[in-house]
């Protein structure tokens, strides 16, 4: 009896440790599906809100045999429920930016190391080591509030870069412009990451000729400017910074992973993240080759829900890349990377 009791105590933590390791070792579609199904079974059993939602749909554990049959939880549930593994404490609480009068999303992160492992491994995959860059962050609307997952991520990247000039800028546009030009003159590899409206503010104050800098927008006007079609935004930013491409980051409060675009609006996911497209008229039906609602599998979100139906519209391509094409008309504008058509 004592031996059985001890096995039950250590069984679940050992299983989760094995699963966490497997998530960041995914190297094929077969391994992704196998891992996703294991994560689904874990979350169905141990995340009450998700299990209740699946049962309400009549989709029980035994019916799920492929990633196409996994139910995707509407992201709005993060505004009304605490979605976390049953009986688990949380390390961090991330909240969405929202707009005045809107209810924000709350993401209770049980293990912050999973988030750090995810965004560090993702950045490494797409851009190499943060140590290669001076990282300048122009994120005023995020810095003005607490509990931003984006600020948490960028703060860690700045720290890991180790460059003396890496840092955040609030409304210090002249100081930022001077620093960009100094780094450019020194030939320093630089990443300028900013919210869209602040980047526009910067190039209206001064134009640049950047040869050693990646400009990455995180999307969203935060009510400071009129929303723009992404192509128009990028054209304006490319002209103002004199760069060939504008990079983008696609992430949100409810996720622990990010997709990146190195230009032309085509995003690529890290190996532990995947985009599926659902029919706009039937949320339980997946479609291919057409515009629909974006469903996100984020296996790093192990202690919450890894299967989310977002409020974004997009299209997935055969090579695994995807585009963001807008939002559902009834959705509120949040801090995701999107431009309204």
Image (tube, rainbow, N blue to C red):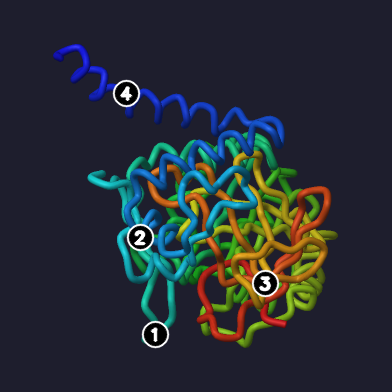
Residue occupying image coordinates x 58% and y 49%: 135
Residue position marked by numbered label 3 in the rendering: 313
**Residue drawn at the location 41% of the way across and 47% of the way down:** 44
Q: Disc 3 to disc 1, how far (Cα)?
A: 24 Å
Note whether 145 is above or below 1 in the view shown: below
Residue 11's disc number: 4
Element type where label 1 sits in the image: loop
Q: Choose top left, top right, bottom left or bottom right for residue 293.
A: bottom right
Q: Is residue 136 left or right of residue 271?
A: left
* Mark 2, residue position: 147
Q: Nearer the viewer, mark 2 or mark 4?
A: 4
Which of discs 4 and 1 lies nearer the camera? The answer is 4
Q: CA distance from mark 3 to mark 4?
A: 40 Å
Q: Secondary structure at mark 3?
A: strand
Give residue 100's mark.
1
Q: Nearer the viewer, residue 25 or 199?
A: 25
In the rendered view, tell whether residue 99 sits above or below residue 276.
below
- Is residue 32 something one can see in this rendering? yes
Instruction: Name the N-terminal-most of marks 4 and 1.
Output: 4
Horizontal arrangement in the rendering, residue 116 relative to residue 282 (left or right): left
Report the quarter where the C terminus lies: bottom right
């Amino acid at each position: 009896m004592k031996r059985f009791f001890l096995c039950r105590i250590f069984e679940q933590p050992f299983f989760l440790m094995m699963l966490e390791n497997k998530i960041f070792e995914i190297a094929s579609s077969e391994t992704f599906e196998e891992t996703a199904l294991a994560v689904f079974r874990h979350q169905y059993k141990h995340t009450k809100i998700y299990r209740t939602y699946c049962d309400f749909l009549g989709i029980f554990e035994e019916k799920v045999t492929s990633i196409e049959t996994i139910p995707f939880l509407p992201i709005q549930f993060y505004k009304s429920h605490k979605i976390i593994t049953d009986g688990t404490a949380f390390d961090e609480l991330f909240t969405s930016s929202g707009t005045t009068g809107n209810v924000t999303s709350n993401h209770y992160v049980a293990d912050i190391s999973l988030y750090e492992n995810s965004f560090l491994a993702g950045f490494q995959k797409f851009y190499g080591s943060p140590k290669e860059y001076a990282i300048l962050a122009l994120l005023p609307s995020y810095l003005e509030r607490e509990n931003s997952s984006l600020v948490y991520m960028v703060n860690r990247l700045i720290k890991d870069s180790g460059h003396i000039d890496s840092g955040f800028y609030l409304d210090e546009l002249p100081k930022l412009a001077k620093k960009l030009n100094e780094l450019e003159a020194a030939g320093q590899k630089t990443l300028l990451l900013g919210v869209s409206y602040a980047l526009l503010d910067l190039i209206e104050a001064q134009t640049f000729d950047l040869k050693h800098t990646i400009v990455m927008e995180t999307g969203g006007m935060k009510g400071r400017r009129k929303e723009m079609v992404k192509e128009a935004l990028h054209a304006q930013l490319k002209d103002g910074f004199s760069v060939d491409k504008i990079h983008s980051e696609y992430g949100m409060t409810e996720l622990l992973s990010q997709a990146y675009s190195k230009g032309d609006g085509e995003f690529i996911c890290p190996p532990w993240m995947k985009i599926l497209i659902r029919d706009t008229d039937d949320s339980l039906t997946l479609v291919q080759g057409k515009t629909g609602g974006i469903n996100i599998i984020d296996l790093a979100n192990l202690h919450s829900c890894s299967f989310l139906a977002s409020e974004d519209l997009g299209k997935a391509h055969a090579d695994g890349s995807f585009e963001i094409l807008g939002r559902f008309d009834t959705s509120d504008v949040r801090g995701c990377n999107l431009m309204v058509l």
